[in-house]
Image (spheres, grey):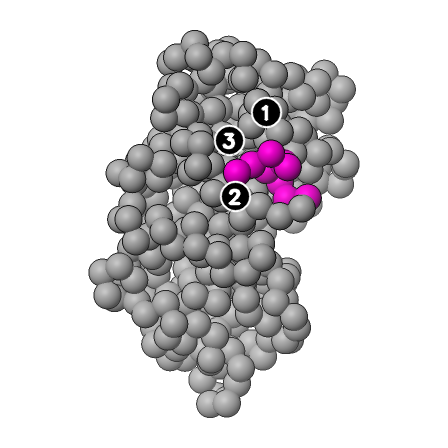
Amino acid sequence: MTITHDTRLTPRFDRAFKPVEAAVMEGRIPGGVLGIVDLEGGRLVRAVGSAQRVPTQRPMSVDTWFDLASLTKVIFTTPRILALAEAGRIDLDAPLISLLPDLRQYDAMAWERKVTFRQCLGHQTPFPAVEPLYTYGRDPDLLRAFVLQREWRAGPPVYSDINFILLGLALERLTGLTLRDLDPGPGFAFSAPADQSAATEDCTWRHRVLSGEVHDDNCSALHGAGHAGLFGAVASILDFAEGLLNGTGAAERSIALMRAPLSATRTHGWERPYDGWSGGGLCSPGTIGHTGFTGTGLWIDFDRGRAWTLLTNRIHPTRHFDSGIIGLRQAVGDLVNAA
C-alpha cells in the first residue's frame, strides 16, 4: 500500500524502497514501512510484507503501529528535557542530583552524583552500555530504587540506556507523574492494539509473542522508562520530523540543541553523521538521526529540508538472527539522498 501526497518524491522514493522489498523477499525481515517527507516535495509512505508471521499471519500496512524502541529517546524524552531547560526548570549543566538527590545518596563523593543532564543526553557518562535490570525483579518501584542506589561500574563513555533511564526518572520527579501517565505526544502511545501492531519477539521470559506491548525488557519491568516504550505509526513519526524541519514542533533553541554537536558522533539526544553511521554516506552535515533495536529509525536532514523513517519488525520472531538491518538502513539512506 502506498500513500502519496506529492508525486515529485516518487522517483526518489521508488529507488529507496527497492532494498526494503528485497529484504522482505529474501526473508531477512518480515515487513517494513518507509516514509519520506520533504518540505518542498510533500510526503510518501509505503508498506510491504507482514506485520506478524507467528503464531498467526497479518499483513503490514501504512497504519501499522510500531514499538519504536530507542526512538523514544529522541521523540519523547529529549524534547521534554530540552523544553524544561528552555523553561528554566532544568539546568542542563547541573548534576542529576538537582532533581534526583537520592542518586547514590550513601556516598557523597560518588561519581554518579556529578553526572549532568547534558552528559546523559550526549552519552558522555561512564555508565555501562547495557544492564539487565529486569533480571533483578519485576517490582517497578524497587527497580527504580535499584537504579538510583546501585554502585555502577564506570568505564569509557558509550551509548547507554542508563543515561535515558535516569533522565526519565528526573521527568517523573519533576512532573509528579509516571512516564506512562505523561502525554506521549500527538499520534503516539505507550502501548497499541495487538492486532494493529507489528509483532516483535517471542519473549523468553514473558513466554509469548509480543505485539502492542513494549519489547524492551528493562522498560517492561520498570513499567515505563525514558529510553524505550513509545509506539507510533509512520504518519505520526513524519509529522514529528516535519515539525522539527519547519520549526513548529519545538522551540528554536531546543531544535538548535538537537543539532548542536556534543562529540564526533552525538548531539543532544541524537546521532550526527560519521563514517559508517546508520543514515548512509550521502547525508548532509546538517542531518541528525537515531535507530531503535526493534528495527526502527528516523533521520532528519535540515540542510535539504527532508526526513525519512524506516520501520521494520526485524526481531520478529527472534533477535538472534542477522537481518542485515545495518546495511539496509544505510542503503535506504543513500538512495533517499542520491542526486
* Residue 24: x %, y % from top left: 68, 20
The C terminus lies in which quarter of the figure? Answer: top right
* Residue 210: x %, y % from top left: 57, 36
Which residue has dot 1 on it?
338
Q: Nearer the viewer, residue 251 or 151?
A: 251
Mark 2: secondary structure: loop
Marks 2 and 1, Cα distance to the nearest angstrom? 15 Å
Q: Residue at x 42, y 25 (%)?
A: 37
Of the residues under marks 2 and 1, which one precedes in the sequence? 2
By secondary structure, the bulk of the magenta-drawn segment is best described as loop
Q: Nearer the viewer, residue 242 or 217?
A: 242
Marks 3 and 1, Cα distance to the nearest angstrom? 16 Å
Tag in front: 3 or 1: 1
Mark 1: secondary structure: loop
Q: Is 27 situated above or below 299? A: above
Mark 2 closeness class: few <14, some 14–19, many ≥20 residues within 10 Å: few
* Residue 52 picture quarter: top right
Outermost residue, front direction? 339
Q: Is residue 48 magenta?
A: no
Q: Are marks 2 and 1 in contact (CB under 8 Å)?
A: no
Which residue has dot 3 on it?
309
Tag in front: 2 or 3: 2
Left or right? Give the position of 262 relative to 93. right
Q: What amino acid type is highlighted by mark number 2?
A: Pro
Q: Residue at x 41, y 59 (%)?
A: 168
Of the residues under marks 3 and 1, which one precedes in the sequence? 3
